[in-house]
Amino acid sequence: MRKEFLPYSKEIIRHFKHPKGLGRIKNPSAIGKAGNIICGDVLWCYIKVGKNKRGEEIIKDVRMEVFGCIVAIGISSLLTRMVKGKTIEEILELTKDDILKKTGPLPPIKVHCSILALDALHEAIYNYLVKKKRKIPEKLRKVHERVVNTLKEIEKRHEEFLKLEEKLR
């Protein structure tokens, strides 16, 4: 019996085939957007912030729209499950390694997808903190600067497509 080779873990395939947390949230607390210069994937993250029983701000709901590959979709689905109900502080401590522990091994060329989903989530949190006129942690500010610069480069490269996309939104 020949075993079929799949370059992605069962967890990624499961989240790709049966994604959770994809789509938009009506009246989100904030929206984040991130992209990757190499592959051209783009993600939008919508968050709804609420409070837990201790009065801490938590991500009450989170959804992502993904223009990307199997791994980008799978990781986005997984990440929405990982962060729902967590505090903003807990989420800001998440790293790509935390995500990769949940996904299992990925081909090295696809590891950027874990960063992309996390970047979109961090951008939504950044935008939420800006709306609330709150202090932006230094680490988050640096992520924001990197994401904004990457998006500018993607926009330059894909100007015609982005015009069409805006018409469709």
Image (cartoon, rainbow, N blue to C red):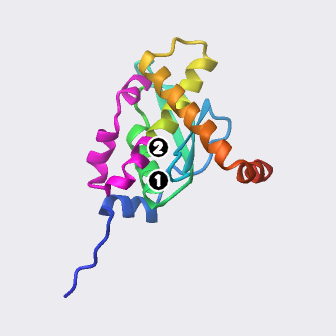
Name the magenta segment's main secondary structure.
helix
Q: CA distance from mark 1 to mark 2?
A: 7 Å
Who is closer to the viewer here, 52 or 159? 159
Q: Is residue 68 above or below residue 146?
A: below
Q: Residue at x 40, y 27 (%)?
A: 92
Q: Secondary structure at mark 1?
A: helix
Who is closer to the viewer here, 65 or 147? 147
Q: Residue furthest bottom?
A: 1
User: Residue 133: x and y, percent?
Assistant: 60, 12
Q: Which mark is residue 72?
A: 1
User: Residue 163: x and y, percent?
Assistant: 77, 49
Residue 169 lies left or right of residue 24; in this view the side is right
- Amino acid identity at mark 2: Ala
Q: Is residue 40 visible?
A: yes
Q: Residue at x 40, y 22 (%)?
A: 89
Q: Quadrant of residue 34?
A: top right
- Range of magenta residues: 88-115
- Amino acid identity at mark 1: Ala
Q: Which mark is residue 41?
A: none
Q: Secondary structure at mark 2?
A: helix
Q: Is residue 137 above or below residue 50?
A: above
Q: Which residue is mark 2?
A: 117
Magenta residue check for 67 = no
Instruction: Decide which of tag 1 and tag 2 comes sooner along the chain.
Output: 1
Q: Residue at x 60, y 16 (%)?
A: 132
Image quadrant where one finds the N terminus: bottom left
